[in-house]
Image (tube, rainbow, N blue to C red):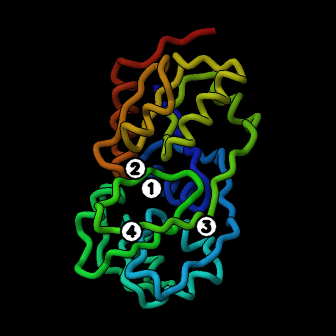
Amino acid sequence: MTLPVLVLRPEPGATATLAKARAMGLDAKTIPLFEVRPLPWEPVPRGNVDAVLLGSANALRHGGEGLSLYRGLPTYAVGAKTAKAARAAGLDVVETGKGGLQPMLRLLQPGHRRLLRLAGRERVTLEVPDSVTLTTREVYASEPLPFPRELVEMLAAPALILLHSGEAAAHFAALCDEAGIRRERLRLAAIGPRVAARAGGGWAMLKSASQPSDTALLALAAQMCEEAASGSQLPEQG
């Protein structure tokens, strides 16, 4: 059985994931359940900031004119794409992480004690060292979209769903329940355990990627598709 792989994340990430998935031979389709939109925000005076903390390139795509205030400031970015976007915005990337924002707080250089976190409305809570002051500004939000009829029809058959965030996991699960879609027909691949937990139970299969990255998530998806094709697929039901 060839499982369709459904990408629910918003653009432009959806298209990027789709291209990588198809390059791996997966039968992937994009049906975003969220739209990322900018939020109004009040910049922190530059003199009150030692360094910038970024967990997503969305903060740079949607931060607007206020970002110009921080050009040249040391920046801690999660992931190569976020780091690339930060450099394009004129920020000085001093560290690029791979495992989320929390580990990056252990990499702070001397003098970087007043951090400005540019983030989304939905975000992971960080445990900040006593010596560090963290100011957060919400500069974007992922707004949930209605359940597309196309997706409802596709989920009448077995499928593999990619979950890139806890909000996506919870939103997708709620929409499935509202639409009467049977969880036991669907396999879910989550970008991490926290995301998987937000999806709840009752699914045919729910697994978490080994690392919180798109690459690891797609590797997991490919493995789960192979498992389905080799005999662990769901029985056909009328």
**Circle 1 Cα neighbour tier, 10 Å, few/some/many (<14 / 14–19 / ≥20):** some
Q: Work out how far the residue at label 3 is from the one at label 1, CA to CA, in angstroms.
A: 28 Å
Q: Secondary structure at mark 4?
A: strand
Task: Give the amino acid type for the residue marked by disc 2 in the picture.
Answer: Met
> Does the CB distance between marks 1 and 2 fall below 8 Å?
yes
Q: Which residue appears at 53% of the width and 36% of the height?
A: 169
The residue indicated by pointer 4 is: 133
Mark identifier at residue 20: 1
Q: Nearer the viewer, mark 3 or mark 1?
A: 3
Q: Identify the mark nearer the N-term, 3 or 1.
A: 1
Q: Quadrant of the C terminus?
A: top right
Task: Give the amino acid type for the residue marked by disc 3 in the picture.
Answer: Val
Q: Which residue appears at 47% of the width and 88% of the height?
A: 47
Q: Nearer the viewer, mark 4 or mark 3?
A: 4
- Nearer-the-camera pick, 33 or 119: 119
The residue indicated by pointer 2 is: 24
Query: Where 106 falls versus 71 (above or below)?
Result: above
Question: On the image, which quarter does residue 206 sit in?
Answer: top left
Q: Secondary structure at mark 3?
A: strand
